[in-house]
Image (tube, grey):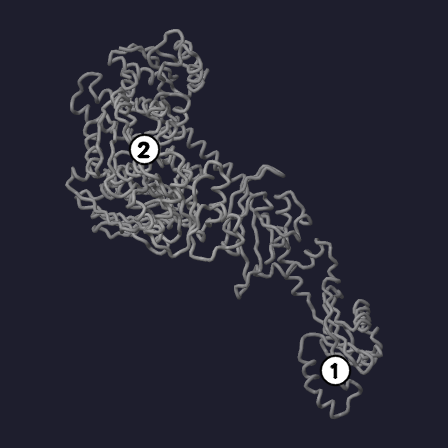
Amino acid sequence: MPLPLLFPLFPARAARLAGIDAGRANTTVMRCVRIEGMTMPTDKERRCFSHIRAFMAGTREGMLAISPDRTVRMLNEPAAAMLQLTRAKTVGSPMDVLGIAELTLSIETALAARTVVQGGFERRNRCYSFTITPYEDGPAAGAVITLRDDTEILAATKRSEAILLSTSDGIIAFDAEDRVTFVNPAAETLLGKGAEQLVGLTTDTWTIFGLAADPEGGVRETGTQTREVRMEEPARRIVDVRIDPVFDDRRTYLGSVSTIRDVTAEREAMQMKNEFVSTVSHELRTPLTSIKGYIDLILDGEAGEINEIQQEFLSIVKENSDRLVELINDMLDISRIESGRIVLKVQPIDVGERIAGAVNTFRAVLDQQGRSIHVDVPEHLPAAAGDPDRVGQVLINFISNAIKYSPEGGDVYVKAQVEDSHIKVGITDEGIGISPGDQAQLFTKFYRVDSSLTREIGGTGLGLSICKSIIELLSGEVGVDSEQGSGSTFWFTLPLASARHVRTPSLEGPLGTPGGRILVVDDCEDVANLIATYLSRRGYEVVKAFNASEAWELALELEPRAITLDVMVDQGAGFGLLEHLKADPRTSKIPVVVLSIICDEGRSQRCGCTGYLEKPIDKNRLVSVIDGLVGSIASPTVLVTDDDRNIVDLLTRTLRQRGYAVMAAYDGKEAMAAVAQTRPDAILLDVRMPVMDGYAVLEALKADPSTADIPVVIMSAYQLDDDYANILSLATQLIGKPFDVDDFVAHIEEVMSENEPEPTASGGDAS
Amino acid sequence: MSRILVADDEPHIRKLVSFTLGNRGHEILQAEDGGQALDMAKLEQPDLILLDVMMPVMTGYDVLDRLKADETTAGIPVIMLSAKSQSTEVQEGLNRGAAQYICKPFTPKDLVRQVNELLDT
């Protein structure tokens, strides 16, 4: 029985549960049929009715007519068979001869009220339904009755209902108006609620579980929704809940069906397995510490001279213990992925930036081997949705494989492009290639292509499987295209960042020479010189400090506009210096950008840094971060919010030319994220935007005391909605589109001068 | 030359650390469990403490908390030496006040570098 029938299937049960009497529910007033000249027919008339007789003889439904005097006027063969009567004895007899009290009573009702009556009865284990239609016969009324044998269809219905009643998965069915129409006993047990409490309610499955509904809407809009739900009541359980929309053959929405599966036992087993992996890997680390440590001591010559053979053998031991450590790390990664304990911070990411970062880590190795890596990323590649660190991990894995598996050398190509609603990144090598048989299994755990080369290279056989899991968790795909002997392309896709992901707009400083003094703190002279070169080319005056105390003195003396700080300066004294700078009122306003190799963004932020960049340093990022910071200190900051990127670009360029620092947001949520990060001196706000419109932004800003005083200029191409007059009155200025850019900037300057509490229009605490 | 307290319940690892740092002229004190480590830290006032996390009697974190709570020992830098190597675990150690966190297995060179960095400041 196909699912769409689920809804019509249970009217009786639904009605019973809702406390409605089925018989009455089915009775509807229709119409009284008037059939002219239904007195005794003449011969001519009999001939005229021959087609009606043929019709009655041919149908499988039982048909009979009752005269106004309550005698049986005619009945067809199927009716006679259903009622087990002979036609000859029945025609002309009073209708009691039919022998079915339910039927004769209903006929009386129909004739008295002159309405159509429907009903049913059971005889000899068969179920019949009937429809009685009165007709006018002069002043009196007769009735025609159709009878149908519903035994088979009812049996089928009961079978389907029995299946749904006995399955161990909980099932809740909803009609198109979101009313609960059916709840099976398994669902009653899992929810701890009786069907009678739920049937008839207009609700949503997530609400029944006490959860928030999907923000994207119901399943009719979103398609299937699934969640893992941890229940406390009536019992502590973990259930997988799945809601599917139900459509009929013509794609008409009939409602939805929710399936609830108890997965407590499976999850517990999974958790035990993961705890086991975690414990074992910790236990393995202890003996490995000794093995590795003592070998390293001997190899480093700390335990006395060793000969060449000893050196070679111990190197083999060391290599293999390193491989064991790698295996343990990969195993932990896999176990975290499988148990869902991996935390993915999905956000809009610049794939080009990620690629540049990953490629940089291999530059030195490739240069040594005299090989090149070619990067091909289109200029305006849209943002992808992903976890920046994990995407970096996948890129590094793929690129490292591309290098390792081309022993003869050859270049590596990294290419990114948009494909449908995804960004596809391919890493191509000129190596040994992979046979079709191996390609199919390459991404499965512990699978390794068996060749002398792979045996030599080592590896755990887990890396690609981890990459696949990460990318799939990010809703992308991985794959490989290869021909043996002519290289391989490993690729992955990531979905384009949707409007749901909130990008935090970055701060762009005014155009022209930024200028100002920057203090660069790094104990490595080469690195300090490199940073100094980048920044002085950009027009900054750079002062270098090679230790913390020197840096502190220079910061006090020179009052630089910004400081770049390697936290590892003076063997890790950088954090102390950062805290010191932030604690002293003379230096607390100077923005500090932490440059670090140890990936400690969290600690840096706690210490009060304004920006964070990982080493090796990417020149463009460094310059744009410093420009933004210096801009926000030296010049007033304007937040431009509009979903039309052309308008945002135009305004950004114009404002930056005029000496403003600008943050560009493309919807209301981005605007709110920007304000939370850096308080602007003025906000330009479009009204009609996706995700969160201008009205909502304005209201939220004015409701928060920390942002209520920021002047807001509303720009709109449309007639402003009078319903929002109250909200709009909160804005400082309203400007209609299209506008003249110069006029517009004049407006902004006016607004900002009116609202300038201090002589400098600085953003105050920019950090 | 500095006095360094090494606390680890694994004798081979104590010896590895002692040998490596002893070779560089440091004086090494050894503790076999958390309780001993705390007592010796208070009594001997070492310049640096290397603490394993999973130890009998008292875990390394309990020792760390008590060292930081006692003003006579709060200033002694502590390096955690642990097989717990996930970033959240490392973060926890640093948040609790450890000056450094070294994951096992480590190489003697790394150990020496980290110890020197802390002792020099």
Residue B1 image point, x, y percent? 26, 10
Residue appearing at x 77%, y 91% in the figure: A42
- Badge number at residue A554: none
Looking at the rendered structure, the number of numbered marks drawn on it comes to 2
Q: Amino acid at mark 2?
A: Glu
Q: Secondary structure at mark 1?
A: loop
**What secondary structure is marked by label 2?**
helix
Name the residue at the bottom extreme: A44
Q: Residues within 10 Å of mark 2 (few under 14, many from 20)?
A: some
With A232 as the anchor, is A148 left or right in this view? Answer: right
Residue at 75% over, 65% down:
A121
Q: In percent of the image, x 48 and y 33: which residue is there? A: A272
- Callout 1 environment at 10 Å: few (<14), some (14 to 19), or many (20+)? few
Tell me if residue A648 comes above or below residue A88 in the rendering. above
On the image, numbered disc 2 is attached to which residue?
A326
Identify the disc placed on residue A35.
1
The earlier-in-sequence mark between 1 and 2 is 1
Where is residue A445 drawn, in percent x and y?
Answer: 36, 42
Q: Nearer the viewer, mark 1 or mark 2?
A: 1
Which of A644 and A709 lies nearest the eye of the viewer?
Answer: A709
Q: Please state if A93 lies on the left or on the right of B108 as rendered.
A: right
